Amino acid sequence: MYNTTHSDQKYITALLHNDSKVLRELYQKFSGKVISFIVKNNGDRERAQDIIQEVLVTIYHQAKEKGLVLTAPFDAYFFLLCKRRWLNEIQKYSHSKVTNLDENVSILDDSESMVQETEKYERQSGLYQSMFDKMSSACKELLEKTLVIKSLEEVARIMQLSYAYVRKKKSECMGKLTQMIQAHPEYQSLKN
């Protein structure tokens, strides 16, 4: 198992910095295998492109928010994420049989554990977003502002509220959001 950053970390860095040259290389090297797999399994090129985009956005967010460090080849990690996303979609939305699961790709232990981390991150983000969406508009507005503007004094000034109120209200809203997340049935499976 690898314990160091893989040389393919350059693709993660390219996503973070929107490096068009390296991103073109990424598409040229890795999208064909994904498209081929999805087309062979009841999909089409357009949906395959959507899956690729969705996975890249997930990787971008995980890298930006959690500092994703690639310890396995990008090829195996990326393909496995796309493959699982497609298989989940097939199972969720149709009763089509998956016809070609064996793809010639070397999947290392590190790739598997990285994919599991990314999938867990995606589920956590989804749970957070769904609970956030259920909050009052006042709480959502306040929490969104405090995510963008780190200074509570600045948030209070912009919202034309007292600093003490903003601090107290943020604490209450975060407490409510945390409660809602922890009460959700999916929380325990994500925690473990």
Image (tube, grey):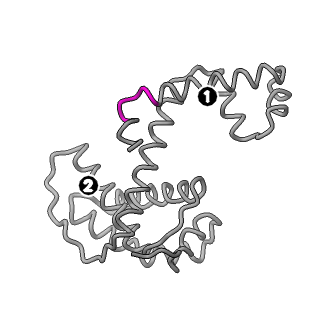
Q: Nearer the viewer, residue 33 or 45?
A: 33
Magenta residue span = 182-186
Query: Which of labels 2 and 1 is toward the front?
Result: 1
Quadrant in the picture for the N terminus: bottom left
Secondary-structure class at tag 2: helix
Give the residue type that dot 1 points to.
Met
Instruction: State the CA–CA distance, disc 2 to disc 1.
Output: 35 Å
Secondary-structure class at tag 1: helix
**Residue 140, labelled with which disc?**
none
Q: Is residue 132 above or below residue 15?
A: above
Give the residue type that dot 2 points to.
Leu
Q: Is residue 58 magenta?
A: no
The image shows residue 36 at horizontal and vertical percentages of 28, 70
Q: Nearer the viewer, residue 190 or 87?
A: 190
Q: Residue at x 66, y 34 (%)?
A: 144
Label 2: which residue?
87
The image shows residue 18 at horizontal and vertical percentages of 63, 66
Crowd band around label 2 with a 10 angstrom C-alpha radius: few (<14), some (14–19), many (20+): some
Question: Which comes before the other along the chain, label 2 or label 1?
Answer: 2
Location of residue 84 (image quadrant): bottom left
Q: Is residue 142 above or below residue 54?
A: above
Location of residue 187 (image quadrant): top left
The image shows residue 62 at horizontal and vertical percentages of 53, 55
Q: Nearer the viewer, residue 34 or 61?
A: 61
Q: Using residue 42 as the reference point, say whether residue 18 is left or right of it.
A: right
Q: Main secondary structure of the magenta part?
A: helix
Q: Is residue 21 above or below residue 34?
A: below
Q: Residue at x 23, y 73 (%)?
A: 103
**Residue 174, labelled with which disc?**
1
